[in-house]
């Protein structure tokens, strides 16, 4: 399990662990929609198995976004005197927007790794 997380964070192919899923070398610091390879450059593993394959990754992305929003609220509430100060909402929004590019890539990589043995 821990090796899989390392390979996910390194953007490695789930089949051969040598090729890259996304064109970008670093999945953490990119802005814009991800540019994904159709096939692994090393083993020719097809990443998108069928049309609509990554719809499930949207649910993973949603879960990541909610978890980040809750974590941001838990940290930010210590800096305000009231239990729920409305000034926390823009802070949560900034964090969610800043992390959205990473979340898209990370959720797709998680989805590919969850179903890497699935074949058509």
Image (spheres, rainbow, N blue to C red):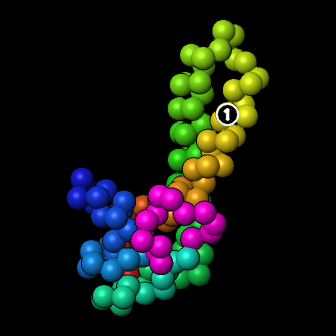
Crowd tier of the residue under label 1, counting other residues whose Cα lies within 10 Å: few below 14, some 14–19, many 20 or above: some
**Quadrant of res 45:** bottom left
**Quadrant of res 10:** bottom left
Q: Quadrant of the C terminus?
A: bottom left
Foreground residue among 60 and 35:
35
Foreground residue among 101 and 69:
101
Image spot of residue 116 (x, y percent) = 35, 72
The relative height of residue 28 versus residue 120 in the rendered view (above or below) is above
Side (left or right) of 9 relative to 99: left
**Residue beneath disc 1:** 91
Image spot of residue 65 (x, y percent) = 58, 46
Image spot of residue 48 (x, y percent) = 49, 80
The relative height of residue 46 versus residue 28 in the rendered view (above or below) is below
**x 33%, y 71%: residue:** 12
**x 58%, y 59%: residue:** 101
The magenta stretch spans which residues?
A: 22-34
**x 46%, y 63%: residue:** 27
The relative height of residue 78 versus residue 1 in the rendered view (above or below) is above
**Quadrant of res 13:** bottom left
Q: Quadrant of the N terminus?
A: bottom left
């Amino acid at each position: 399990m821990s090796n899989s997380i390392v390979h996910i964070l390194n953007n490695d192919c789930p089949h051969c662990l040598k090729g890259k899923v996304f064109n970008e070398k670093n999945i953490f610091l990119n802005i814009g929609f991800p540019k994904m390879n159709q096939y692994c450059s090393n083993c020719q593993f097809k990443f998108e198995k069928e049309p609509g394959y990554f719809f499930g990754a949207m649910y993973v992305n949603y879960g990541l976004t909610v978890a980040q929003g809750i974590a941001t609220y838990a940290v930010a509430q210590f800096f305000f005197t009231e239990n729920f100060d409305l000034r926390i909402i823009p802070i949560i929004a900034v964090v969610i927007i800043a992390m959205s590019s990473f979340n898209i890539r990370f959720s797709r990589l998680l989805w590919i790794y969850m179903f890497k043995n699935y074949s058509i």
